[in-house]
């Protein structure tokens, strides 16, 4: 997904710690005619011009000796920069390593101290069935889709409010449990071994795999904040505890009841597991706009929830 949002930047580390830890450091002392679209430009000793589109190459730490303005700023994985007490004005967007908008600047952003924008390492996966591309992220020993599944099925799946124009690109589809299990048997194993509706090489996470995820992130009481997309572009205010430090980018896709009614987009996101609880119910996980908690619960198999797949 990516992601269009207003995010809170993480201001960490002192200038001295940047200097101590820097392996590749560029200190800019002059200006040249350069569009800064190539990572190699950052080692040439130049100060960016207003509206330059800037790339900070992976593994590079940058220090600046004067104020500067830039347009689009792209920070690759494991790269950082420090303003050294100078002002940075960004008049465009901050991009992540995969050219997704990570921070949408509505006017301008002033940074007067050291700045690190941490981007979890995201990769891409293309579903051969329909050519749709998904972000993926590795959290602990698991690799998850970082977006909700959005594969068409002739029955058992819906866009929220049956409105594909508004909800397709962001939230994906809502599926009932029979559709996501796709004729296979419930599993409580880790890994589940249930491909279900997931693409080849991926599977539907079991109740135990969801628990592994939340345990890795510190337990259900805090993991929700680490899973939720930040800001209130998609989640309702106050989006309590949201940091998305895991890169999971959970969004509030709401849910569909068996009677065809839809509820709680903006306020709630829910994701199926491959594990049934009763003949009529299955385990799922849910997140709320007003809490950093991950709730583990069972609900009717006929309800529609979002789906995230895990790599085999």
Image (spheres, rainbow, N blue to C red):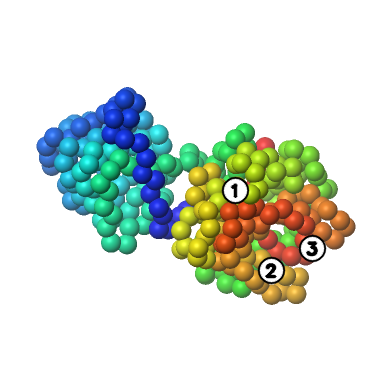
What residue is pinned by disc 2? 256
Sequence-wise, the earlier of marks 3 and 2 is: 2
What residue is pinned by disc 3? 300
Describe residue 117's horizontal placement relative to residue 287 as left or right: left
| Residue 86 percent across, percent down from the top left | 20, 43
State the mark number for residue 187. Answer: none
Sequence-wise, the earlier of marks 2 and 1 is: 1
Describe residue 101's horizontal placement relative to residue 214 as left or right: left
State the mark number for residue 222. Answer: 1
- Residue placed most toward the observer, 176 or 299: 299
Q: Residues within 10 Å of mark 3 (few under 14, many from 20)?
A: some
- Residue placed most toward the observer, 195 or 86: 86
SS at mark 3? strand
Question: Does residue 108 appear in the picture of this structure?
Answer: yes
| Residue 41 percent across, percent down from the top left | 23, 35
Which of label 2 and label 1 is nearer to you? 1
Q: Spatial distance from mark 1 to mark 3, Cα to Cα?
A: 26 Å
The tally of labels here is 3
Which of label 1 and label 3 is nearer to you? 1
Q: Residues within 10 Å of mark 1 (few under 14, many from 20)?
A: some
Question: Residue at the location (48% across, 39% down)?
Answer: 121
Question: Residue at the location (79% across, 49% down)?
Answer: 275
């Amino acid at each position: 997904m990516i992601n269009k949002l207003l995010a809170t930047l993480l201001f960490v580390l002192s200038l001295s710690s940047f200097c101590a830890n820097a392996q590749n450091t560029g200190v800019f002392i002059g200006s040249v005619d350069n569009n800064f679209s190539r990572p190699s430009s950052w080692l040439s000793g130049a100060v960016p011009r207003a509206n330059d589109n800037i790339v900070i190459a992976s593994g590079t730490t940058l220090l600046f000796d004067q104020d500067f303005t830039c347009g689009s700023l792209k920070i690759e994985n494991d790269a950082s920069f420090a303003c050294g007490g100078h002002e940075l004005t960004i008049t465009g967007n901050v991009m992540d390593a995969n050219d997704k908008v990570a921070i949408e600047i509505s006017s301008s952003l002033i940074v007067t101290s050291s700045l690190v924008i941490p981007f979890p390492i995201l990769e891409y996966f293309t579903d051969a069935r329909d050519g749709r591309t998904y972000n993926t992220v590795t959290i602990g020993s698991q690799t998850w889709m970082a977006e909700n599944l959005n594969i068409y099925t002739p029955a058992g799946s819906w866009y929220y409010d049956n409105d594909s124009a508004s909800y397709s690109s962001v939230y994906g589809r809502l599926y009932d449990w029979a559709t996501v299990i796709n004729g296979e048997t419930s599993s409580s194993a880790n890994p589940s071994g249930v491909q279900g509706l997931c693409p080849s090489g991926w599977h539907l996470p079991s109740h135990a795999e969801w628990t592994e995820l939340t345990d890795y992130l510190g337990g259900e009481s805090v993991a929700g904040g680490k899973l939720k997309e930040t800001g209130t572009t998609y989640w309702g205010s106050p989006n309590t505890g949201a940091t998305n430090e895991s890169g999971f980018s959970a969004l509030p896709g709401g849910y569909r009841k068996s009677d065809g009614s839809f509820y709680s987009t903006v306020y709630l996101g829910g994701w199926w597991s491959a594990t049934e609880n009763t003949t009529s119910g299955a385990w799922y996980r849910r997140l709320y706009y007003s809490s950093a908690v991950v709730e583990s619960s069972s609900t009717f198999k006929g309800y529609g929830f979002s789906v995230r797949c895990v790599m085999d």
